[in-house]
């Protein structure tokens, strides 16, 4: 039987082959960055249950088969055929499509070319882009997540975006990755590097669609976002991942002064999903809002970890993550609020309500406050329970059968997060998806 | 056959007996008021008719059009034509009033073997009934009861009742917390809906709603039993003299009997 350790060793052994196939210039600084990252990964290995951060997400249980690090042997584009419809109905957007982690120029369309610059990561590596290299080197030593190092070692493609100072994007940037079947188990490492200038307004939607069927891919995604001063950014993460694949998403966000950031995670499918979001409030008077909804059933496992880091005084953060757990699903929520020494006048709120719809579902919730300043307001709370009997009775007394009443109430619970979505077409799309999932037919 | 017939109804919650032998007959076309002090069992009676599950019927029967009501699920009772206007209507964020009512009407129609209402007829029906309780149609797109004032919630109950056109409507302290204007609107709604084919059971602590809705019969519920029944003048007496004189009458009667 293959163990997580075997998988790790194989990844390390095969790195040479991967590197040879890449055909990158030997003088390209990326080579050293990759090597260093591989060493870090080798030293850490895959997490086990003994790692506090992975206690409830037994990722090694899923690592029982070899993953082939994806190498693109041809430079051509994926054909339209076989590519599922990735559009969000009614949404006009700057679209950037990736298939199995590889950028697809033919399927992409940038409308607002005057507002932001885009280069795919593969080209940026080839061009030894200084910003890219500086960001890769900035993946700081204290980073303890082996998946980030794995991503950095085997990084192949993704989006590098620079939104110009003063740009006000009229349309969202829509980054969609589609996993298609390839008769094998692949490791896909996608890296997005997004830099938002000062005084900008922008929305970014990332969507992960998995149609790889029987393939057991490991999607290992790492997104870094830098937000300039007085900029306002919305960031959405959607997932539509049927099948057996694993999804590991890491997000690192740095916010400038007087900026606002709204982030949303919608997990309505997924065999094993882990999303980590670290937000650092680096400039004063900035505001971070985090919203999440995980609606799970069957054997779904969703691990949401957030960290909001108040590094400076006078900032505000608010977090609402809601969970619906049915079947034998497992939800993990770990929300940390960090208030650094001197970060006075911090206001930080966190709320994580959950509804368990079946006896077989499990929730592990752990809010954490680490406060090193004395003039702050912080609250947190996590709850789990069943649907309110009084609410059910109200609906039943109006003629609705229990199943329908339950579905309506469950939807109402989820809606509190959905209604915060500020892009109407996206909100409608999510409403429909959740209604569909809860089998509500209006 | 009475529309509603309650025979020697005993009911308890968590082992405490709340209703200790209720007998009541309500015929089509009648309005009955049930009055009584706090804790007398008024809301329990309403809950049992509507099918709230935490109450256990330990003895007796409740018949609706001759059928055993206790055996039915709450939604089946609603479909058969029973409506409860809640004392504390529930807020349901995310579910619009229009969608909620649409779902509700269509369940009832399905039960009656009728086709679902088309969108135009549905809207016409809702608008007509909203006018009855003087609600603005903007309420339709708002979430059920969310952010509604106390008066708006109660009007919404009467609005739902008007749309669903029940055979028997039970109003559980619908008048509590209402100002005089809202009270008149609620009463007006009831009076307009009242006809020879339906009946109302109005549960109230105070007489003032009965200034606007004239009951055929008034019953006094005390300690789980109906201890006195009379015409509308009984309500006025209760308003003037409270419940003490009834208690005294009862005590006197029991002393004589012993």
Image (spheres, coloured by chain):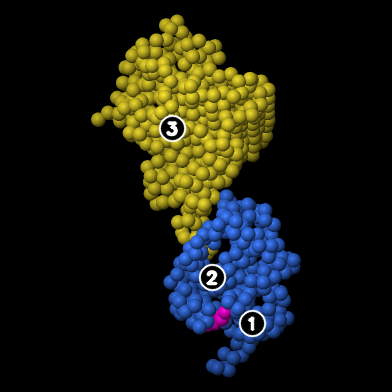
Chain colours: A yellow, B blue
Q: Residue furthest top?
A: A27
User: Which x, y percent locates residue A89?
Assistant: 53, 37
User: Which x, y percent locates residue A78?
Assistant: 42, 23
Judging from the image, mark 1 belongs to the subunit labelled: B
Q: Is residue A347 left or right of residue A181?
A: right
Name the residue beneath numbered marker 2.
B82
Residue B216 numbered mark, or none? 1
Along the line of sight, which residue is nearer the eye, A401 or B126? B126
Mark 2 vs mark 3: in front: 3
Magenta residues, start to end: B22-28
Residue A84 numbered mark, or none? 3
Judging from the image, mark 2 belongs to the subunit labelled: B
* Relative to A345, residue B105 above or below: below
* C-alpha distance separating marks 3 and 1: 67 Å
* Relative to A304, residue B59 above or below: below
User: Which x, y percent locates residue A98?
Assistant: 46, 25
Residue B27 part of the magenta-drawn span:
yes
* C-alpha distance separating marks 1 and 2: 19 Å
Residue drawn 53% across and 40% down?
A: A429
Find residue A215 and report its image quarter. Answer: top left
Residues beneath discs 1 and 2 located on the same chain: yes
Residue drawn 67% across and 56% down?
A: B137
* C-alpha distance separating marks 2 and 3: 49 Å
SS at mark 2? strand
Residues beneath discs 3 and 1 located on the same chain: no
Q: Which residue lies furthest to the right in this view?
A: B181
Asked whether residue A22 appears in the rendered view, the answer is yes
Along the line of sight, which residue is nearer the eye, A103 or A394? A103
Marks 2/3 in contact by CB < 8 Å: the verdict is no
Magenta span: predominant SS is: strand
Residues beneath discs 2 and 3 located on the same chain: no
């Amino acid at each position: 039987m293959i163990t997580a350790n075997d998988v790790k060793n194989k990844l390390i052994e095969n790195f040479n082959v991967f590197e040879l196939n890449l055909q990158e210039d030997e003088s390209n600084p990326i080579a050293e960055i990759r090597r260093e990252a591989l060493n870090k990964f080798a030293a850490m290995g895959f997490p086990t249950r003994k790692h506090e951060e992975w206690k409830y997400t037994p990722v090694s249980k899923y690592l029982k088969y070899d993953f082939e690090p994806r190498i693109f042997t041809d430079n051509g584009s994926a054909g339209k055929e076989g590519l599922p419809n990735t559009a969000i109905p009614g949404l006009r957007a700057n679209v950037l499509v990736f298939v199995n982690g590889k950028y697809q120029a033919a399927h992409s369309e940038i409308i607002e070319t005057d507002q932001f610059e885009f280069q795919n990561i593969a080209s940026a590596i080839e061009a030894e882009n200084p910003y890219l290299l500086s960001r890769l080197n900035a993946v700081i030593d204290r980073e303890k997540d082996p998946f980030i190092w794995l991503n950095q070692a085997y990084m192949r493609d993704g989006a590098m975006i620079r939104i110009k100072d003063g740009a006000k994007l009229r349309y969202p940037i829509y980054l969609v990755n589609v996993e298609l079947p390839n008769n094998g188990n692949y490791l896909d490492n996608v890296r997005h590097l997004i830099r938002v200038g000062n005084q900008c307004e922008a929305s970014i939607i990332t969507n992960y669609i998995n149609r790889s069927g029987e393939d057991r891919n490991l999607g290992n995604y790492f997104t870094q976002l830098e937000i300039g001063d007085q900029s306002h950014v919305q960031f959405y993460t959607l997932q539509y991942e049927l099948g057996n694949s694993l999804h590991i998403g890491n997000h690192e966000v740095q916010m400038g002064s007087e900026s606002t950031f709204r982030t949303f995670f919608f997990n309505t499918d997924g065999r094993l999903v882990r999303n980590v979001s670290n937000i650092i409030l680096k400039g004063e008077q900035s505001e971070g809002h985090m919203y999440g909804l995980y609606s799970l059933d069957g054997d779904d496992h969703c691990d949401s970890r957030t960290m909001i880091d108040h590094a400076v005084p006078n900032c505000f953060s608010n977090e609402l993550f809601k969970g619906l757990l049915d079947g034998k699903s497992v939800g993990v929520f770990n929300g940390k609020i960090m208030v650094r020494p001197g970060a006075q006048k911090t206001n930080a709120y966190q709320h994580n309500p959950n509804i368990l719809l079946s006896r077989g579902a499990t929730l592990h919730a752990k809010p954490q406050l680490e406060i090193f300043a004395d003039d702050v307001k912080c609250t947190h709370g996590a709850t789990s329970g069943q649907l309110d009997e009084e609410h059910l009775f109200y609906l039943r007394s109006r003629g609705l059968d229990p199943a329908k009443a339950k579905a309506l109430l469950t939807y109402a619970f989820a809606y509190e997060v959905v209604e915060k979505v500020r892009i109407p077409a996206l909100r409608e799309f999510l409403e429909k998806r959740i209604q569909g999932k809860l089998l509500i037919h209006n | 056959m009475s529309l509603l017939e309650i025979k020697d109804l005993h009911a308890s919650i968590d082992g405490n007996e709340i209703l200790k032998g209720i007998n009541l007959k309500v015929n089509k076309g009648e309005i009955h008021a049930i009055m009584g002090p706090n804790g007398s069992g008024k809301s329990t009676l309403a809950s049992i008719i509507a099918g709230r599950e935490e109450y256990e019927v330990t003895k007796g029967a409740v018949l609706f059009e001759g059928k055993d009501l206790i055996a039915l699920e709450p939604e089946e009772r609603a479909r058969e034509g029973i409506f409860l206007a809640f004392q504390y209507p529930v807020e349901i964020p995310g579910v619009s009033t229009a969608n909620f009512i649409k779902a509700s009407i269509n369940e009832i129609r399905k039960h009656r073997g009728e086709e679902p209402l088309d969108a135009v007829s549905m809207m016409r029906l809702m608008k007509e009934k909203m006018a009855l309780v003087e609600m603005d149609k903007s309420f339709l797109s708002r979430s059920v009861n969310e952010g509604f004032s106390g008066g708006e919630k109660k009007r919404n109950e009467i609005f739902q009742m008007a749309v669903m056109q029940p055979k028997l409507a039970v109003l559980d302290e619908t008048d509590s917390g209402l100002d005089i204007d809202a009270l008149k609107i609620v009463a007006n709604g009831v009076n307009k809906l009242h006809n020879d084919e339906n009946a109302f059971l109005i549960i109230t602590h105070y007489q003032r709603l009965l200034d606007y809705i004239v009951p055929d019969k008034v019953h006094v519920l005390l300690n789980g039993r109906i201890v006195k029944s009379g015409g509308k003048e009984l309500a006025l007496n209760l308003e003037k003299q409270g419940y003490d004189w009834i208690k005294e009458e009862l005590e006197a009667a029991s002393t004589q009997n012993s």
